Image (cartoon, helix red, strand yellow):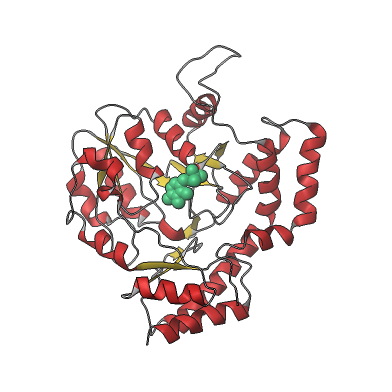
Amino acid sequence: MKIDFANLQRQYQIRKIEIDSAIQEVLNQSDYIMGKEVFDLEKNLCEFVGSPYTISCSSGTDALLMSLMALGIGNGDEVITTPFTFVSTVEVILRLGAKPVFVDLDPFTYNLCHLDLETKVTKKTKGIIPVSLFGQPCNMEEILILANRYNLFVLEDAAQSLGAEYKQKKSGNLSEIACTSFFPAKPLGCFGDGGAIFTSDIKLADKLRSIRVHGQGERYHYKQLGIGGRLDTIQAAVLNIKLKYFDQDILKRRVIAQQYDLSLKNKVVIPLVSEDVKSTYAQYVIQVENREELVLALNQLGIPTAVHYPIPLHLQDSLKCLNYKVGDFPVCEALCHKVLSIPMNPCLTDDEVNYISESICNLTT
Ligand SMILES: *Cc1c(COP(=O)(O)O)cnc(C)c1O
């Protein structure tokens, strides 16, 4: 059997007719920049997430960058986040001249450990970026209480968790501002780069809409520095179609995760999802001891895998300026040697899921 990790082709084929015609409609109008579909998408996302304002944009990375710009983050500021995330979360902090400050992880959820947060707060701390890793939101209640006490912003990085829930509330609507990504392999992916920002603050929303077009107020009048951060109309058209089926897709992911859980729980460490959370399983991540061998063996059986993430951010060359060293975040460092993401997407068949589970079981006895 030959398994596809993300099944982007299958995901397209099952909605091909609708998606093709939505793209054709944009071509017919030739309204490529900020066309009607972009505003439709923002409205649809507000409804989906329950957030009062949605600002679509060019990528998840730009969503984070624009959010920090709107929050006024710059030189001398500190922002607390996790070393176990995609590099963007941290890159944008440094890009603005501010300093990322890491906390170690909760060993069960792999999210930042809220118990350690307070020890990282200094006079320079401006905010916290909790990352809802692999589709599971952090302990937001505790994080918000702490943020309130020290007057910090909370910006959820929901790039992997659109559609997830924490205490019956949707990811993206758990803090005053949150960001997501529509990178093709994310749970809700478009056919290129894309992202969105959710906020409940009308002032932030206005500022973000201006930052998205180079800080423009009136045409050719620039109030502040911004970026070219718009989402293409064609991508919005694709997302409007895919969003209609997104709840179904997430349910499918949860069913597959349950099947994996059942077959793998006695063989490897399976993902642990908190009781008050519903995950999107952006990745289904197991922990194994013999990762290198297992990866090779699975590959020979036609089963692709990935490692999210092999090197913690505090040990990356590009972040050397922060002066972290091996041993600073032991939970994170240990995880990086053991985590393995196995195929997870709504188009996997039962046969494929069984084949993957059985292969892993056979190879880990
Ligand atoms: C994918 C991802 C991003 C960046 O999104 P892009 O759209 O690829 O720029 C940021 N944070 C996390 C946690 C991600 O997984």
Residue 176 spot, x, y in % from top left: 43, 41
Residue 186 spot, x, y in % from top left: 54, 54
| The one of 123 and 200 positioned closer to us in this rendering | 123
Q: Is residue 222 above or below residue 352?
A: above
Q: Is residue 55 above or below residue 6?
A: above
Label count reads 0
Residue 108 spot, x, y in % from top left: 32, 67
Q: Residue furthest right?
A: 28
The quadrant holding residue 152 is top left
The quadrant the N terminus occupies is: bottom right
Residue 265 appears in the figure = yes
Q: State the residue at coordinates (25%, 64%).
A: 334
Q: Is residue 86 above or below residue 362?
A: above
| The one of 183 and 119 positioned closer to us in this rendering | 183
Q: State the residue at coordinates (17%, 48%).
A: 119
| The one of 357 and 72 positioned closer to us in this rendering | 357
Q: State the residue at coordinates (48%, 28%).
A: 203
Q: Is 298 situated left or right of 150 in this image?
A: right
Q: Is residue 165 above or below residue 234?
A: below
Q: Residue furthest top?
A: 221
Q: Is 18 situated left or right of 291 in this image?
A: right
The quadrant the C terminus occupies is: bottom left
The quadrant holding residue 43 is top right
The quadrant holding residue 230 is top right
Residue 211 spot, x, y in % from top left: 50, 25
Q: Is 287 situated left or right of 44 in this image?
A: left
Q: Is 255 situated left or right of 33 in this image?
A: left
Residue 157 appears in the figure = no
